[in-house]
Image (cartoon, helix red, strand yellow):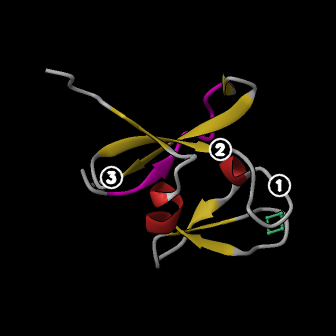
Amino acid sequence: MGANASWIGHDLPPIVRSGVEYFLLSHRGQLYLVPNACPHRGGPLKFGYINEKEQIVCPMHHNAYSIERLIARDTTLRLCVDPS
Ligand code: FES
């Protein structure tokens, strides 16, 4: 996998913060916590896949969401890997 390949932390345990469940997403070398709820009907995006257009495809009804748009939402948290 190249350094800039995007991936989802499918196998990680649930990440819950303030009652919201997130999944880990790596995109272009940055890590993000994205709410694990599809914008359509709340399906578990964590168990979707990333297609060739850099979209996450929801496992429920197969809507595809641009990673760039998902990480731009104010509900997505960007993790600081190196705080120095
Ligand atoms: S819940 Fe994700 S596409 Fe419908």
Sequence-first disc among 1 and 2: 2
CA–CA distance in space, label 1 to label 2: 10 Å
Sequence-first disc among 3 and 2: 3
- How far across and down, in percent of the image, does residue 14 sit? 69, 27
In depth, the one of 14 and 75 nearer the eye is 75
Q: Is residue 63 above or below residue 59?
A: below
Q: Is residue 7 magenta?
A: yes
Residue underneath mark 1: 42
Magenta range is 5-13
Q: Secondary structure at mark 3?
A: loop
Amino acid, disc 3: Met
Amino acid, disc 2: Pro
Disc number for residue 35: 2
Residue at 30% in and 30% down: 80
Residue underneath mark 3: 1
Amino acid, disc 1: Gly
Q: Is residue 37 left or right of residue 7?
A: right
